[in-house]
Amino acid sequence: MARKPLMAGNWKMNNTIGEAVVLTQEISNQYEKEWPESVDIVICPPFVDLKPAKTVFDFDKTKIAVGAQNVYGEPAGAFTGEISVPMIKEIGCTCSIVGHSERRELFGETNEGVNKKVKALVAAGLYAIVCVGESLAVREEGTTDEYVCAQVRAAFAGVDAREATTCVVAYEPIWAIGTGRTATPEQAEAVCAAIRATLSEMFGEEVAEGMRVLYGGSMNPGNVGELMVQPNVDGGLIGGASLKAASFVQLIEACL
Ligand code: PGA
């Protein structure tokens, strides 16, 4: 089954509201109305930038979606500092990144927490971009596939095939994030194929063949071509290169 690529920009903790408006306007200015025929595009800015970014993209009638970088698994209540799925849904977000390695490493996010967030998102009709990926130590040990596929199983535990079908998995080797050290196309393909095989075991082949598996980790205009030709790489989760309109647009155009 032909899968439509997804290019997702992960701004991380960058851009104040003013800066976000400038960057979204720059992207919007270069927008071509043919893009959505070939590629889905979402940007995931910090929470405070979601509404302004959405407003710019809607005002300019672009089909660029916005998503959150994280969300909490409960709908409301005494959870100081957290943001719920209904809150991002009302802004018009279509998705949230879940389980990014920075959240797992720096903020103690667990597989159980990731699973709760995935369930909260799909129950509300949003989709999750579930991040998985191994450290350099795991890769050197030779247990990458086992480690990553266990993360996939945990993230989707108790999620049914109908709910999973809209979700996305992003394979992001931790040693490649923000380091300029990209996985080789062969390394990316091997793990993305193992992820799809796991999704197939969980949800059946047809659903797994329709789900998108992204690569993330120093994806840039120079390496996007060789990554995107891999049969199991369906797009990118892009950090650094999504912070400049010119490079983000080049990544989108690589999917046309
Ligand atoms: P990077 O980040 O493109 O800057 O390596 C990717 C990510 O962490 O999602």
Image (cartoon, rainbow, N blue to C red):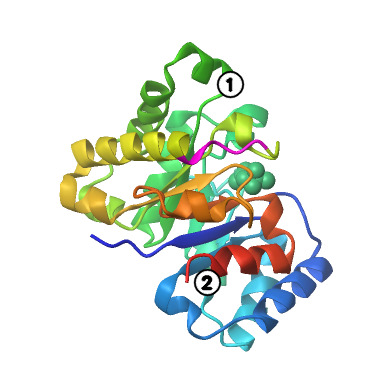
Name the residue tied to disc 1: 136
Name the residue tied to disc 2: 92
Left or right of residue 14: residue 119? left
Residue sitting nearer the eye, 161 or 63: 63
Left or right of residue 132: residue 25? right
Residue sitting nearer the eye, 185 or 242: 185
- Mark 1 is surrounded, within 10 Å at the Cα level, by few (under 14), some (14 to 19) or many (20 or more) other residues, namely some
Left or right of residue 190: residue 129? right
Q: Tell me if residue 117 is in the magenta stretch.
A: no
Residue type, numbered disc 1: Leu
Residue sitting nearer the eye, 149 or 178: 178
Q: Residue at x 71, y 51 (%)?
A: 240
Could you say where residue 119 lies in the image, as x and y percent from the top left? 37, 46
Where in the image, quadrant-wise, is ligand 1 located? top right
The main secondary structure of the magenta stretch is loop
- Whichever of callouts 2 and 1 sits on the residue coming sooner in the sequence is 2
Q: Secondary structure at mark 2?
A: loop
The answer, for residue 8, to whether it is visible in the render is: yes
The answer, for residue 87, to whether it is visible in the render is: no
Could you say where residue 106 lies in the image, as x and y percent from the top left? 67, 30
Compared to residue 192, the image places residue 126 above or below, namely: below
Most distant residue in the top direction: 141
Q: Residue at x 52, y 61 (%)?
A: 7
Could you say where residue 63 lies in the image, as x and y percent from the top left? 51, 79
Compared to residue 189, the image places residue 243 above or below, namely: below
| Numbered label attached to residue 56 | none
Q: Tell me if residue 183 is in the magenta stretch.
A: yes
Could you say where residue 82 lies in the image, as x and y percent from the top left? 62, 47
Residue type, numbered disc 2: Gly
Residue sitting nearer the eye, 177 or 90: 177
Q: Which residues are magenta?
A: 181-185
